[in-house]
C-alpha cells in the first residue's frame, strides 16, 4: 500500500482496535507521514465470513473517505538528540534518566546504564570499525544501524567493550532476509532472537555454555547483557516497540534476553559453526528466531532412539506455528534441539551422527492431520497445491512437522543430568563470523 501511495494512488487500510498505532508506525517506517485507516471493532481472525462481511459493511464510510483523501506527504527523519539530567546527586540523576527513557519507550523495564558520551566512546574502543559506519538498515522500522548506535544500546544494556563485535555480527545476521526479521520483530506471537556464540571468543568473553546458560546469575552475566542489548537494538534502532510494530499478544521472558554459547568441550560431534563451514578456531555468532522453548526431560533412557523419541514427542506441538508452516510452501520455519551433554553422549556413543539425529526427528516427530486441519493457519486457501488433498484425507493421517531433516538443527549445551530443550523457530539460523 505504501508503494501505491508514493505513486499517487490513495489507499485505505482496514485494521482492528488496538492495532491503530501499529499501522501508523508502519507507515512512518516506510516514509509516509500518515495513512488512512478504517478501524474495525475486533480483528478479523477467528470470525465467520458473515461477521467479517458485517464489520466491513459497518466501516464503508471510513473506507470511502480514505480513498478520496489527498495522498500524504513523506515524513522527515528527526535528527539525533542528546539529553541532560540534573538532580541532587548522581544516583538521583540516573533515576530521572531511567524514568524519562522508560516514559519514551526506550527501555526494557530494567534499569539502564546511562549512555554518556564517555561510556559510548569506551564501548567503541572494543571494535576497529568507525562509529559512523552503517552495518545495515534494520527492520521493521528501517532504522539506520550504525556502529555508534549499536554501541549506545550496548552501554544501556550493561555490556563490556569486548562484547561489541558480537553485537555487530548479530545485527548483520538479523538483517539477512532468511532470518525473517519481519516476523520475529512484529508478530502477534512471542518470537525472540537467540544469539548462539561459537569459537574461541565464547571463552574469552565468559559466555556461559553450561549449567543455566539461558538463565540468570553471575555465570551468565555475558549471556544476559548481550541478549539484552539485542532486544534494545531491535527497539531503539529497529523501532520494534510493543504496541507499535511489535504486536505480541502475551509475550515471553525470552524477549528480554536469549544468548548462549555451545558447550564445545562436551560436544561429541563437530561444533555447530564447523558444520556450517567455519573452522573450529573461527569465532561466529548465529542468530535464530525462537517461537517457543519446550523442556525435554528424559532421565531414564540409555538408548539413542529412546532419548530422541522424547525430543520427537515434544516437538509435535499443534500450537507451534513451525509445525504447520511448511505446508504453506512459502514459509521456512526451522527448529533447534538443545541437547544436554548427557543426551548427546548417549546418542553419539552408539554411533549416531548429527545427520542421523535429523533424519530420526523428521521421520518420528509426526502429528495427526486433525490437529492442524481446524486450529492452525493451513486451511484450504493456504495449503500448497501439493498438499490440498489433505482436506479430503482421514483426520488421523500422520504428517511431518518440518519441511525436511535439515530443518532440525542440533546444538549441545547445558550441564549434567538428562534435561534438554526444543526450540520451535521462525526462519533459518544465520551464522556470521565475528570481526574486530
Image (cartoon, rainbow, N blue to C red):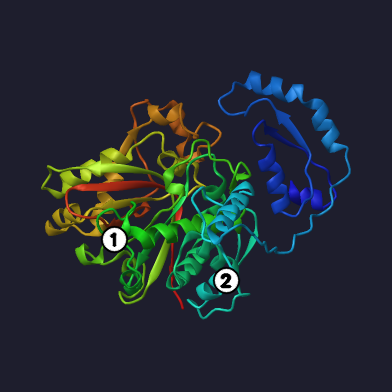
Q: Position of residue 86 (x, y in %)?
A: 64, 59
Question: Which SS class for mark 1?
Answer: loop
Image position of 289 with respect to 57: above or below: below
List the single residue furthest toward the bottom. Answer: 128
Question: Which SS class for mark 2?
Answer: helix
Q: Say which residue appears at 46% left-offset and 26% top-offset.
A: 374
Q: Say which residue appears at 89% left-offset and 44% top-offset.
A: 70
Disc 2 target residue: 147
Disc 1 target residue: 209
Q: Position of residue 430 (x, y in %)?
A: 45, 62
Q: Position of residue 282 (x, y in %)?
A: 36, 76
Residue 22 in sight: yes
Q: Position of residue 131 (x, y in %)?
A: 60, 75
Asked where in the image residue 414 lies, by quadrant, the reply is bottom left
Image position of 434 with respect to 112: above or below: below
> Which of the pair 232/265 is nearer the observer?
232
| Left or right relative to 234: residue 369 | left
Residue 364 in sight: no
10 Å crowding of disc 2: few (<14), some (14-19), many (20+)? many
| Left or right relative to 173: residue 366 | left
> Which of the pair 108/185 is nearer the observer?
108
Give the mark nearest the N terminus, 1 or 2.
Answer: 2
Amino acid at each position: 500500500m505504501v508503494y501505491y501511495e508514493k505513486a499517487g494512488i490513495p489507499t485505505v487500510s482496514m485494521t482492528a482496535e488496538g492495532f491503530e498505532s501499529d499501522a501508523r508506525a508502519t507507515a512512518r517506517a516506510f516514509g509516509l507521514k500518515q495513512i488512512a485507516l478504517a478501524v474495525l471493532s475486533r480483528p478479523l481472525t477467528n470470525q465467520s465470513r458473515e461477521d467479517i462481511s458485517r464489520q466491513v459493511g459497518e466501516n464503508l464510510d471510513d473506507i470511502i473517505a480514505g480513498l478520496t483523501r489527498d495522498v500524504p506527504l513523506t515524513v522527515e527523519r528527526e535528527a539525533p538528540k542528546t539529553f541532560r539530567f540534573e538532580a541532587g546527586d548522581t544516583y538521583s540523576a540516573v533515576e530521572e534518566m531511567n524514568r524519562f527513557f522508560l516514559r519514551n519507550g526506550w527501555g526494557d523495564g530494567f534499569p539502564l546504564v546511562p549512555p554518556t558520551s564517555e561510556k559510548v566512546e569506551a564501548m567503541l574502543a572494543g571494535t576497529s570499525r568507525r562509529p559512523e559506519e552503517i552495518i545495515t538498515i534494520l527492520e521493521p522500522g528501517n532504522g539506520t544501524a550504525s556502529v555508534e548506535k549499536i554501541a549506545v544500546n550496548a552501554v544501556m544494556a550493561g555490556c563490556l567493550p569486548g562484547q561489541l563485535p558480537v553485537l555487530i555480527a548479530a545485527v548483520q545476521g538479523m538483517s539477512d532476509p532468511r532470518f525473517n526479521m519481519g516476523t520475529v520483530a512484529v508478530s502477534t506471537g512471542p518470537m525472540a532472537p537467540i544469539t548462539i556464540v561459537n569459537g574461541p571468543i565464547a571463552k574469552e568473553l565468559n559466555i556461559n555454555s553450561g549449567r543455566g546458560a539461558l538463565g540468570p546469575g553471575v555465570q551468565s552475566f555475558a549471556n544476559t547483557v548481550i541478549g539484552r542489548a539485542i532486544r534494545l537494538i531491535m527497539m531503539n534502532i529497529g523501532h520494534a516497540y510493543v504496541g507499535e510494530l511489535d504486536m505480541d499478544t502475551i509475550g515471553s521472558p525470552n524477549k528480554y534476553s536469549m544468548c548462549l554459547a555451545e558447550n564445545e568441550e562436551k560436544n561429541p560431534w563437530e561444533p555447530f559453526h564447523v558444520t556450517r563451514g567455519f573452522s573450529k578456531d573461527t569465532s561466529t555468532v548465529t542468530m535464530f528466531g525462537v517461537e517457543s522453548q519446550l523442556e525435554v526431560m528424559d532421565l531414564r533412557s540409555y538408548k539413542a532412539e529412546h532419548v530422541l523419541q522424547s525430543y520427537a514427542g515434544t516437538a509435535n506441538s499443534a500450537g507451534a506455528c513451525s509445525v504447520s508452516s511448511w505446508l504453506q510452501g512459502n514459509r521456512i520455519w526451522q527448529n533447534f534441539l538443545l541437547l544436554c551433554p548427557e543426551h548427546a553422549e548417549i546418542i553419539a556413543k552408539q554411533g549416531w551422527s548429527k545427520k542421523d539425529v535429523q533424519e530420526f526427528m523428521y521421520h518420528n516427530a509426526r502429528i495427526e492431520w486433525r490437529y492442524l486441519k481446524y486450529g492452525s493457519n493451513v486451511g484450504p486457501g493456504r495449503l500448497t497445491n501439493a498438499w490440498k488433498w489433505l482436506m479430503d484425507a482421514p483426520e488421523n493421517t500422520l504428517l511431518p512437522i518440518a519441511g525436511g531433516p535439515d530443518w532440525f538443527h542440533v546444538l549441545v549445551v547445558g550441564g549434567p543430568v538428562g534435561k534438554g530443550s526444543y526450540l520451535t523457530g521462525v526462519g533459518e539460523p544465520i551464522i556470521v563470523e565475528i570481526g574486530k
